[in-house]
Image (cartoon, rainbow, N blue to C red):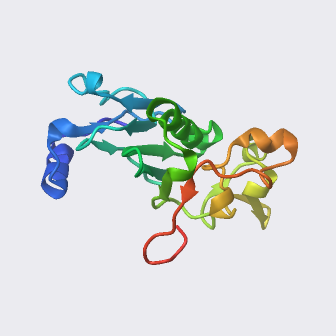
């Protein structure tokens, strides 16, 4: 999608008390590229660069992605003070973008996966996410539900979601024995995301 308009940037400044110069967003392309926002790129922001994820250890920098049906994934390592945000649509999830973002946090900021808190934002629900047969070859069979000769994606326990667990388990029979790459926390109100 496009980068923020001036009206959208002004709205964020008003509602988030965040300076416009400190807000970083990207041109989302449903891929697996994650950008590390560093001090070196603060003046030449990656805003507008094609990617679907951002991570940073810089304080007072807001990271943003846009979603509609796609899942926003928020990452936070309180020990290393590192944050990330991922636009995890089905194409990006199939390419393991969240796993790659967490790996960047580990490689660049020395985060430990068990310290990374993962929060899932609102997205289309499995009951409504009808997909075609091409999903059967892209995701594990356990990720797809068939009802009335229709296929629906995403009806899996969130802790074993392809958003958090690498797809590499396909050839080994699935994700049953894989651990998620981060710690999924329930929202404060106690409901599953």
Image vertical order of residue 183 relative to residue 97, above or below? below
User: Measuring 52% from the left and 31% from the top, which residue is drawn there?
Assistant: 107
Image x and y of residue 69, in percent = 49, 54
Image x and y of residue 68, in percent = 44, 53
Image vertical order of residue 125 relative to residue 1, above or below? below
Relative to residue 160, is residue 50 drawn left or right? left
Relative to residue 182, is residue 168 drawn left or right? right
Of the pair 103 and 22, the residue shown nearer to us: 103
User: Measuring 25% from the left and 41% from the top, which residue is drawn there?
Assistant: 61
Image x and y of residue 125, in percent = 57, 64
- Quadrant of the frame with the N terminus: top left
Relative to residue 173, is residue 117 drawn left or right? left
User: Measuring 20% from the left and 24% from the top, which residue is drawn there?
Assistant: 43
Q: Is residue 70 visible?
A: no
Image vertical order of residue 65 relative to residue 118, above or below? above
User: Measuring 78% from the left and 57% from the top, which residue is drawn there?
Assistant: 142
């Amino acid at each position: 999608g496009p980068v923020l308009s001036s009206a959208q940037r002004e709205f964020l400044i008003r509602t988030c008390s965040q300076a416009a110069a400190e807000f970083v967003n990207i041109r989302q392309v449903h891929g697996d590229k994650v950008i590390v926002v560093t001090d070196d790129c603060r003046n030449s922001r990656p805003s507008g660069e094609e990617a679907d994820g951002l991570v940073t250890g810089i304080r007072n920098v807001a990271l943003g992605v846009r979603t509609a049906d796609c899942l926003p994934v928020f990452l936070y390592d309180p020990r290393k003070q590192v944050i990330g945000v991922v636009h995890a649509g089905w194409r990006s999830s199939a390419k393991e973008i969240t796993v790659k973002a967490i790996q960047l946090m580990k490689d660049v900021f020395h985060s430990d996966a068990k310290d990374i808190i993962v929060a899932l934002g609102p997205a289309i629900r499995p009951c409504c996410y009808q997909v075609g047969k091409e999903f059967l070859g892209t995701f594990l069979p356990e990720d797809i539900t068939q009802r009335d000769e229709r296929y629906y994606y995403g009806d899996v326990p969130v802790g074993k979601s392809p958003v958090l667990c690498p797809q590499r388990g396909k050839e080994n029979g699935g994700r049953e024995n894989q651990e998620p790459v981060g710690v999924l926390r329930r929202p404060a109100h106690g409901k599953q995301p």
